[in-house]
Image: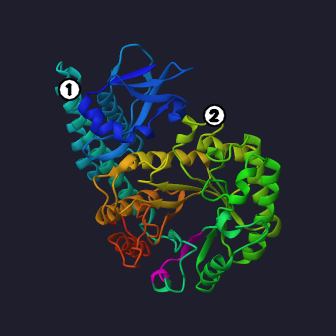
Amino acid sequence: MLRFTVDPATSATAVQPTLSQAYTLGQDETPLPAAVSMTDGELRCQVEHARSAGVCLGFDSGAGTTMVATCLLQLRDQPYRLVLELARNQIRLCLAKCDDWLFADHPLAQPALKRLDQARELFTEAMVERDFMRAEHASREALRRAIEAGELLAYAHANAALCMRYASRGASRSSVGVRVDLDLDPLRLAPVLADIDLLMIPTPWRALEPQPGSYELANLDRWIHYAAKAGKRIVLGPLLDLSDGVLPIWMIPKRHDEVALRDRHAQFCSTIIHRYGAAVGMWITAVGLNECRFVPLRPESMVDLTRRVAVAIRHSLPKARLMVELAHPWGEDVALSPKAIPPLRWVQMLIDEGVRFDAVGVRVLQGVQERGGMVRDLLQISAMLERLVHLKVPIMLTAVGLPSSGKPGSAGAWRGTPSPELQARWLAAIVTIGLSKRFIETVCWGQLVDKDPSQPAMGLLTAEGKPKPSWEQFCSIRKRLKEPLGIGSRALA
């Protein structure tokens, strides 16, 4: 067992609100199947079949409520101090990335390193302090400053790298895009979409085939026709999404019947490919199969279904570009489902099995009230993206987003209560971090217009169509990226 002490006040305000999102970690930051709970004033992780583990959980450090983790710790009877271990790992991550980036002597890094020095001093103070409450206070302040240092470091490094990448030439027209909603009218949005060259157009199976063999494609037809006529680059899909909100209602009773699932989906897939193939620049073949959230599949079935979609597309369109999409790149589902496969292992499995694709899509939707939607700091996002380089295929951020309003709840919050201004700042940071990495081709915002009031307000426009500060930021960034930035250029925001 892994045990952590935490004072009652900190537990009630900083840990308990997001405890449902907590999970344990093993080697290579892979989630472990283990129960995490608060019992008798202790955080306890029931870890089995491992000598060491860490815990990852939402924590309110004073710099927002974000997912943070401990280092791997030896299992023992004596409890660790939770906040101290969280601060230790956050400081370690800052130092490791600074070394990886060879960034310690760069002028842009100095504000971050100054904040990091403050965090280290407070951490040392907490280590030697014998009074538990004083040590807790110092640990929490060390964690807050380490998170702030990490975000400053990630953003500073991204700005330096972005200016180097686009020093002598501007970014491609499709480097920044947006995901649209089929229910919206593209003609009414045409003035807004005029300067956006890349549209991610979804193909939700439930909405497009509400009854077996009966298709409702009018909305999708409108978007494809508009995008093709306007000369937009179209990324269509995912064709295969078995999540509980996308699988047709009539297929739910048969979701454990792999043969029926395969055959019915093949008909849907064939219909979409033959109808829109000539207009589509890239196809998203599948998303989230490795998570086994609603339809638990055997690994061989995951691979087979993905392969069938790829083969169906290339049979009709031999030169088509294909993408496999990761819905939750930190792989939290592995901690809860024995059938779930870690995201990077899943993509590598497809490569090893000879499933051909041209890119990997990654969604980074933060502040969403679901497993895997908890907010993470910018340094963690940057570090996660850099692990994808080992796949040796181009990466596209297919849906990024942060709410502009609402209560944090179990989804956490970036730097405080969600607001339009914070959403705009996060947009600038995530686009900068994404495009600063040469293996990332595109960053797409995950929602254009706010729609359902019960859902997080992720849109760049309000439900009434009024632009938010994030829309102004989006347009400003896209305009600046059209031209060479030059070495030493100022930040995008």
Q: Which mark is residue 338?
A: 2
Instruction: Say which residue appears at 76% left-offset and 64% top-offset.
Output: 269
Q: Nearer the viewer, residue 90 or 175?
A: 90
Picture coordinates of residue 114, whole percent (x, y): 21, 43
405 falls in the magenta region: no
Residue 468 visible, this orientation? yes
Q: CA distance from mark 1 to mark 2?
A: 38 Å
Residue 377 visible, this orientation? no
The magenta segment is: 192-201
Residue picked out by circle 1: 135
Q: Which mark is residue 167?
A: none
User: Which quadrant of the structure image shows residue 38?
Assistant: top left
Q: Residues within 10 Å of mark 1 (few under 14, many from 20)?
A: many
| Amino acid type, callout 2 | Pro
Instruction: Say which residue appears at 81% left-offset and 64% top-offset.
Output: 267
Task: Give the left or right position of residue 269, taking residue 454 as reference.
Answer: right
**Position of 55 relative to 252 (above/below):** above
Picture coordinates of residue 436, whole percent (x, y): 44, 58
Task: Give the left or right position of residue 289, taking residue 404 as reference.
Answer: right
